[in-house]
Image (tube, grey):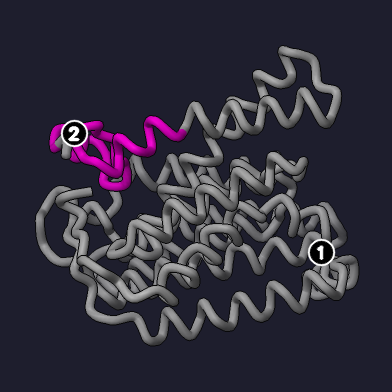
């Protein structure tokens, strides 16, 4: 991988076409854009400009979903590609994705699992705090500030030398508290109202998927993948904690009601991809160094 980038960031992971899976992604992104753009033009009467914009968003969601799949299940490429395909299918159908929330889930997971092999830099935390703000104020999911804070707290719990990072956790909580106060200042009332707006079929389905994924995290075998910058094996506890951040993020969206659940389908798609990949015996181990 491109080591100079790791002097600047510990959560950036550039795509390099000399790796087969990365090349496959670069080929599939314009395909995803075409599928989503054509769907918008053909089935939702979008103009050519609107269809092009939808296609661009489709490519972005496809990439973020693939990248998130690599974070929550680094030893199986299938998770990333199945999650990518399901995410594209979801938005091609017409559900509008919460792109900022998807990006936040990805980068918060990287803070915890340290897939690059290094602790997040202060500049990384500023970036992810910005993503949390966008998820809260643009996507409208008020608990996302707290999700970012939880990722920082997990990282500090696993590395006590990182205690100063808790400043960013405080700022993340502040984002959620700000919206909470604006909405009346009663968190349980807001959460209960959001959950009440979720259709029972979706509540049951997401509950089953979440339970299976939680069991997968608990039974996660030893991780064979290595950190991009260090070449050292990734920590199984950190991979579990990163997966938990992803799971908690989509559950936080439930507190915003049915529309938020549908907007986070790309994240659920990645979780479903992980379940599907675990159900199929792994033929060969793939490490971070060759993907």
Q: Nearer the viewer, residue 99 or 212?
A: 212
What's the residue at 19%, 59% (across, down)? Answer: 287
- Badge 1 is on which residue? 185
| Distance between mark 1 and mark 2 Cα atoms | 52 Å
Q: Is residue 171 left or right of residue 196?
A: left
Image height of 254 relative to 130, above or below: below
Image height of 169 relative to 48, above or below: below
Q: Are marks 1 and 2 in contact (CB under 8 Å)?
A: no
What's the residue at 46%, 40% (across, down)? Answer: 63
Label 2 sits on a secondary structure element that is loop
Q: Position of residue 268 (x, y in %)?
A: 60, 61
Q: Which quadrant holds the N terminus? A: top left
Tell me, yes or no, whether the highlighted magenta stretch contains residue 6.
yes
Q: Position of residue 69 (x, y in %)?
A: 43, 56
Q: How many numbered marks, from 0 up?
A: 2
Q: Is residue 167 visible?
A: no
Tell me, yes or no, whether the highlighted magenta stretch contains residue 13.
yes
Q: Which residues are magenta?
A: 3-28
- Badge 2 is on which residue? 18
Q: Position of residue 285 (x, y in %)?
A: 20, 66
What's the residue at 55%, 40% (across, down)? Answer: 61
Q: Is residue 76 visible?
A: yes
């Amino acid at each position: 991988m491109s080591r100079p980038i790791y002097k600047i960031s510990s959560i950036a992971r550039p795509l390099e076409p000399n790796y087969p899976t990365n090349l496959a992604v670069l080929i599939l992104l314009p395909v995803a854009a075409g599928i989503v753009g054509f769907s918008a033009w053909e089935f939702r009467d979008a103009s050519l400009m609107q269809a092009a914009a939808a296609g661009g968003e489709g490519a972005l969601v496809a990439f973020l979903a693939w990248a998130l799949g690599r974070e929550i299940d680094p030893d199986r490429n299938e998770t990333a590609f199945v999650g990518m395909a399901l995410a594209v299918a979801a938005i091609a159908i017409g559900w509008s994705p919460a792109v900022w929330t998807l990006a936040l889930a990805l980068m918060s997971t990287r803070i915890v699992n340290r897939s690059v092999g290094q602790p997040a830099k202060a500049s990384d935390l500023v970036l992810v705090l910005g993503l949390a703000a966008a998820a809260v104020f643009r996507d409208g999911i008020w608990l996302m500030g707290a999700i970012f804070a939880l990722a920082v707290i997990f990282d500090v719990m696993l590395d006590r030398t990182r205690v100063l990072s808790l400043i960013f956790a405080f700022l993340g909580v502040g984002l959620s508290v700000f919206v909470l106060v604006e909405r009346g200042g009663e968190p349980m009332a807001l959460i209960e109202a959001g959950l009440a707006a979720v259709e029972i079929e979706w509540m049951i389905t997401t509950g089953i998927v979440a339970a299976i994924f939680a069991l997968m995290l608990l039974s996660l075998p030893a991780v064979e993948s290595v950190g991009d910058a260090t070449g050292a094996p990734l920590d199984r506890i950190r991979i579990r904690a990163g997966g938990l951040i992803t799971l908690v993020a989509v559950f936080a969206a439930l507190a915003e009601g049915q529309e938020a659940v549908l907007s986070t389908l790309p994240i659920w798609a990645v979780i479903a991809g992980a379940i599907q990949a675990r159900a199929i015996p792994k033929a060969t181990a793939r490490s971070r160094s060759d993907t």
